[in-house]
Amino acid sequence: MNSDTLALAQEIDFSFPALFLRATLMVKLVMALLIIASFWSWAIIVTKLIAYRRARGEAGGFDRAFWSGEPLDELFEQVGPAPKGASQKVFAAGMLEWRRSHRDDGGLIAGAQARIDRSMDVAIAKQAEGLNKGLSFLATVASTAPFVGLFGTVWGIMNTFMEIAQQQNTNLAVVAPGIAEALMATGLGLLAAIPALVFYNKLSSDSDQIAAGYEAFADEFATILSRQLDS
């Protein structure tokens, strides 16, 4: 390889800012989109990790209070009809329907058990929706970011070949910068997609486990109320 060509190639700045600034407008847009998607994904990841940890702590604390032997009516008075915690909301939904199912004479309106179950199911569905909020974005980034990056790479390589044709020069100093800029787009696509995929799988599993805990609590609570109905 020509020593002059090597010297020119070594003088080229291959840092990320330099590659970004030298890229064509389309490749810059692709890179910017992938960077924004990556930051947004990490914001969702961190937010969800904190929210899931808080949800587990709240569920554990309320579970201990529920099984402490305290009368359910007293526990409901402490929690209130509009609590903040997810487990408490499921409990409050069941207790509200339980109280509404009593007639003035103390008897129960027919179909109370089914209405209590539906009320808790609706509360669980709302909590599950909140737990899953944002995960679809992670799934979208995980599945599309590599292809978006590949599009940027194809576009950058196409422009590199066009430049080679215009200059009629294939030495390293002409080819290397364009190829590096193009491959940077693919690298950014993978950088955005891999964490999004890994944490989407983890957070989806965590969300399912937390929601399953709410459902298990609702089943246990419904069983307790069913005994009282039967008695």
Image: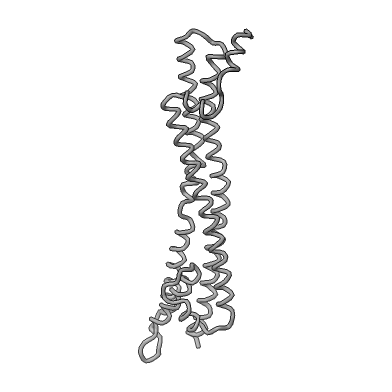
**In the displayed structure image, the side of residue 130 where residue 197 appears, left or right:** right
**In the displayed structure image, the side of residue 167 where residue 63 appears, left or right:** right
Q: Which x, y percent locates residue 81? A: 41, 75
User: What residue is rendered at 44% in x and 10% in y?
Assistant: 166
Q: Which x, y percent locates residue 74? A: 49, 84
Observer-nearest of 8 and 52:
8
User: What residue is rendered at 44% in x and 24% in y?
Assistant: 24
Quarter residue 116 falls in = bottom left
Which quarter of the image is occupied by the N terminus? top right
> Where is 158 relative to 115, above or below?
above
Please give the count of numbered marks on the rendered protein: 0
> Where is 2 relative to 41, above or below?
above
Quarter residue 103 falls in = bottom left
**In the displayed structure image, the side of residue 81 where residue 41 appears, left or right:** right
> Where is 108 relative to 152, above or below?
below
User: Most extreme residue toward the front, as rendered?
Assistant: 11
User: What residue is rendered at 44% in x and 67% in y?
Assistant: 123
Observer-nearest of 179 and 125:
179
Q: Which x, y percent locates residue 51? A: 52, 59
User: Most extreme residue toward the bottom, as rendered?
Assistant: 105
Q: How is the image coloured?
A: one colour
